Image (cartoon, rainbow, N blue to C red):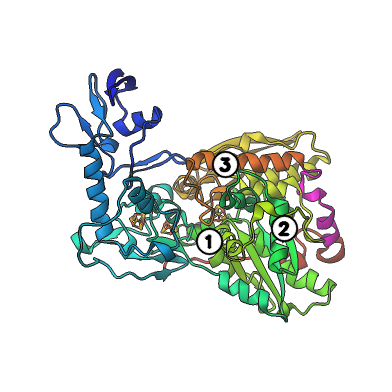
Amino acid sequence: MLVNIKINGKDYQADSSLTILKVCRRYHIHIPTLCYMFHEETNLEHKPASCRVCVVEVKGRRNLVPACATTVYEGMEVTTNSLKCMEYRKNVVELLLSNHPNDCVYCAKNNKCELQALAAELGIRRVHYHGELSQKNEYHNARGLLKNPAKCILCNRCTAVCREVQSIEAIVPTMRGFKTVISTPNKCITCGQCIQVCPTGALIQQDDTLLVEKALADKDKYVIVNTAPAVRVSLGDEFGLPAGTNVEKKMVTSLRELGFDKVFDTNFGADLTIMEEANEFIERYQKKENLPLITSCCPGWVKFIEQEYPDLLQYPSSCKSPTEMFGAICKSYFAEKNNIPKENIVVVSLMPCLAKKREAARSELSNDGYQNVDYVLTVKEYAELLKRRGIQLQDLPDSDFDHPLGESSGAGDIFANTGGVIEAVARTASKWLQGEVKDCNFTAVRGLSGVREASVKVSDDVTLNLCICSGLAGARKVLEEIRNGTSKYDAIEIMACPGGCVNGGGQPVRTDMDQIDVIKARQKGIYDIDKDKLIRISCDNEEIKALYDEYLIAPGSKKAHELLHTHFHDSSKA
Ligand code: SF4
Ligand code: SF4
Ligand code: SF4
């Protein structure tokens, strides 16, 4: 029902189901917030009304009310910017700062911290309250997540995302009152989504930049980097470029400037993944065995099924992820072709993903005693590395990837988006089944919602029932169907991060735009790259064909299995 209200003396109409905050946002009237979060990617509204920063005056009410938790009604008169509101907010933030280390100069969130920005917005120049800190100002490393309770403002955005978006509850508030803290993660899949929503430096990611700098400085090492598809449309965010800008060619130049011996594309590994995965899928489909096949390139999701659904481990594809396949090929085919001892090769992966750090350490992702990938840098870490060296990405000239592991199809690029892996499989399966693909845009699988279904015709007599999940709460429902025997799908793509790797846990967070618009811009950037690619189907990649001709023989061969496939473990009791 529409109601008439006044905000700051002006007339507006709004639906009576909406809160004051939502109405104000709709009409671009600014009310500061801190604990509030609208996670538009998943439609999760988190409004604990605990920080009281969004308080406003409502005519006829003696006390200020939180705008995030108060719905509008006919005749309501709201004031958002009175002196009383301003002073109350200032007081609230000063109290938070009195229990905060305030070491902004060297905090990882400096210039990206919402508490710091709020203090500046409210004109806080000194804190009038002083007392002891409730927690020690130190970071604890828990599986790649660095947690500092002294910087925590107990907004619970992180716990809400972990519980509602990922359905895990790896972190929860513990203890009471002054002693309350967010728990150490348990059963965490290292998706990093909690870090992305934390407004302060209380949750940050592990920093491996020094390890990579040491490898680059070691003259005996041959350091190879590979860059994930999603990185090229997000790295520009850290250098003030519009969201979704494709910086691939400048990124390649920047990596050479840092001293990498070879700059290759993980997209090559993505095309290789599709060769193996499409082959595996067709085999399983024709035998009607272990269907649905579930994609396995997301290590956050792989960890999830290992710990939550170990009875379903026959369903994920046995393919390693693209970067792990790439690393295995670097330390075998590439090393042998170029007479480089594999012990001297260091493979660095530049990723949108925090879970890749843990994936790289898995003992089964190795060959001949060497890990396939040595170090993983997220986009955030890489941007810091560049800034530390004084390299301004936007000022660099363009250059291209090295070869022979640098060629890729558009199918490799779309791995960055939710739905992209399954679309890439459909393209190659279609080519193999009917020899020609008239239109390789299987747009039915695209989108953003957490669970999507699509029927895709890949040949005259084969139509596949597909399902695409991003965010693990939706995936859980789909897995329950497999468990109880009601699943109707032939193949399922699961990515842990809502929207896929374009919204990965290692991606830059923009403070000037809504995250949903950032994700959409990155998705569009990826589809534009794919649209303009000369080759759009993985099996048409000439360098992939050469790799099979010279080395791997055929998809699914013994050699391919040794290097490119893996297995999974029951970790429900770990
Ligand atoms: S990284 Fe993911 S799984 Fe781990 S605590 Fe954060 S949101 Fe939960
Ligand atoms: S760790 Fe961050 S997101 Fe979680 S409660 Fe503390 S401040 Fe909020
Ligand atoms: S969706 Fe992408 S970024 Fe997120 S955990 Fe999976 S692989 Fe990593």
Name the quadrant of the C terminus.
bottom left
Residue 143: image x %, image y %? 46, 68
Q: CA distance from mark 2 to mark 1?
A: 23 Å
Label 3 packing within 10 angstroms: few (<14), some (14-19), many (20+): many
Residue underneath mark 3: 467
The kind of secondary structure element at disc 1 is helix
Q: Position of residue 80 (x, y in %)?
A: 28, 33
Disc 1 or disc 3, which is closer to the eye?
A: 1
Name the residue at the left extreme.
62
Element class at badge 3:
strand
Q: Which residue is mark 1?
A: 355
Question: Which of disc 3 and disc 1 is earlier in sequence?
Answer: 1
Residue in the foreground of this view, choosing between 532 and 435: 532
Q: Does ligand 3 reach within 8 Å of label 1's beta carbon?
A: yes
User: In the image, is 25 to the left or to the right of 236?
Assistant: left
Q: Residue 70, labelled with which disc?
A: none
Q: From this viewpoint, is residue 101 visible?
A: yes
Q: Give the magenta-colored segment's residue range.
A: 533-548
Quadrant where the N terminus sits is: top left
Residue under pointer 2: 252
Q: Looking at the image, can residue 273 be seen?
A: no
Q: Nearer the viewer, mark 2 or mark 1?
A: 2
Residue 300, x across and y down, in percent: 52, 58
Residue positioned 42% across, 51% down in the render: 197
Residue 225 lies, in percent from the top left, at 69, 65
**Left or right side of 558 for 385:** left
- Relative to 10, say whether 91 is above or below: below
Question: Viewer-proximal residue, 122 or 143?
Answer: 122
Quick one: label 3 or label 2, which is nearer the N terminus?
A: 2
Instruction: Using the rendered view, name the quadrant where residue 327 is placed.
Output: bottom right
Q: Give the Cα distance between marks 3 and 2.
A: 34 Å
Residue 309 covered by magenta stretch: no
